[in-house]
């Protein structure tokens, strides 16, 4: 079985969640995927102002934007992220294992329904119990 790279997981999150409005929201969804859904990513999350934060995740996201695979937009309130057409094509070429795709899709359905405040609360609770 081929290894799934961390950026592939970020692209998969965007594929199944659609547009993600807010860096905080993106960070918490990725954290919950790692901690609750046991998706294998190497991101190290540290306690931060709004709960667990990964500098490496943010750097990978910026890199994906620089490659034109992810579109980052900013307004007065938040940053938003979504896959570009190139990102969709690239992700299809990566052949992410079906089992990983199923986990990410399921988690996006579950966590996508929560408000950012709820995601932060859940992430704080999990991080506090470790």
Image (cartoon, grey):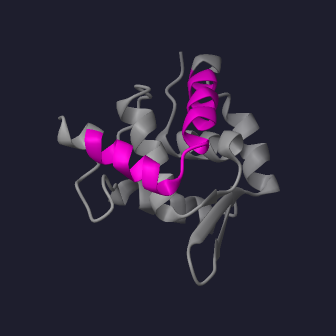
Residue in the picture at 31% in, 52% down:
52
Q: Nearer the viewer, residue 127 or 30?
A: 127
Q: Nearer the viewer, residue 120 or 64?
A: 120
Q: Is residue 103 magenta?
A: yes
For residue 41, say whether it is visible: yes
Image coordinates of residue 89 in percent, x first then y, are 79, 45
Image coordinates of residue 104 in percent, x first then y, are 58, 31
Residue 96: image quadrant is top right
Residue in the picture at 64% in, 61% down:
81
Count of numbered circles in the view: 0
Where is 103 relative to 56, above or below? above
Residue in the picture at 45% in, 35% down:
33
Where is 18 relative to 49, above or below? above
User: In the figure, is residue 25 to the left or right of 90?
Assistant: left
For residue 60, say whether it is visible: no
Q: Quadrant of the C terminus?
A: top left
Magenta-highlighted residues: 100-125
User: In the figure, is residue 80 to the left or right of 119?
Assistant: right
Image coordinates of residue 59 in percent, x first then y, are 43, 62
Q: Is residue 85 magenta?
A: no
Main SS category, magenta section: helix
Image coordinates of residue 107 in percent, x first then y, are 56, 32
């Amino acid at each position: 079985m081929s290894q799934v790279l961390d950026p592939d997981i970020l692209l998969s999150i965007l594929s199944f969640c659609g547009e993600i409005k807010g860096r905080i929201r993106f960070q918490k969804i990725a954290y919950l995927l790692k901690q609750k859904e046991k998706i294998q990513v190497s991101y190290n999350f540290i306690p931060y102002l709004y709960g667990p934060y990964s500098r490496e995740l943010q750097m990978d996201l910026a890199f994906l934007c620089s490659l034109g695979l992810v579109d980052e937009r900013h307004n007065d309130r938040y940053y938003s992220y979504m896959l570009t057409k190139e990102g969709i094509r690239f992700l299809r070429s990566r052949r992410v294992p079906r089992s990983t795709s199923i986990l990410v899709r399921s988690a996006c359905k579950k966590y996508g329904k929560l408000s950012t405040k709820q995601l932060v609360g859940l992430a704080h609770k999990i991080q506090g119990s470790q």
